Image (cartoon, helix red, strand yellow):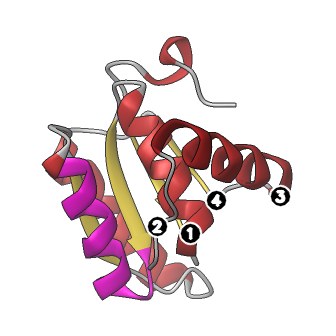
Amino acid sequence: MVGRKDSGGRRGGLSGPLGNVGFALAWLYHRAGAKVAVLDLDLVAAERTVAAIEQDGGTAKAFETDVLSQASTSAAVAAAAEEFGSLTWLRPPSAEEAQQASSAFRRRTGTEHST
């Protein structure tokens, strides 16, 4: 599970496909103090995630990438690292973490996020 000790002051990225689960994880990383790079093939959905984080006072940026393409992913990671100065983590959500993040997001906000 994401916690302030894990993410505070760090810069990292979540890779897609993200959907609701990815939004929840990005939100939790943001709430733990991280700057978040949102890497997804669906740039519109990634930008909605970024907008929500920014509206809450956080720092995030969307990067379009196809995680099945090494060249696309490498380019997005390089752009994210340049934007934030560096990345201290980059990862896709695990199934267990995705379930926990989704539940935690619903509990904390009382809402569902639609991507």
Identify the magenta region: 40-54
Q: Residue 96 magenta-drawn?
A: no
Q: Is the residue under label 2 in contact with that under label 3 (CB below 8 Å)?
A: no
Q: CA distance from mark 3 to mark 2?
A: 18 Å
- Look at discs 3 and 2 and give the one toward the viewer: 2
Q: Mark 2 sits on what residue?
A: 113
- Look at discs 4 and 1 and give the one toward the viewer: 1
Q: Mark 3 sits on what residue?
A: 95
Asked if 32 appears above or below 12 in the picture, the reply is: above
Amino acid type of the residue tagged 3 in the rendering = Ala
For label 4, the crowd category at 10 Å Cα-Cα, with few meaning under 14, some 14 to 19 and many 20 or more, is: some
Q: Is the residue under label 1 in contact with that under label 2 (CB below 8 Å)?
A: yes
First in sequence, mark 4 or 2: give its number: 4
First in sequence, mark 2 or 1: give its number: 1
The image quadrant of residue 32 is top left
Q: Residue 48 magenta-drawn?
A: yes
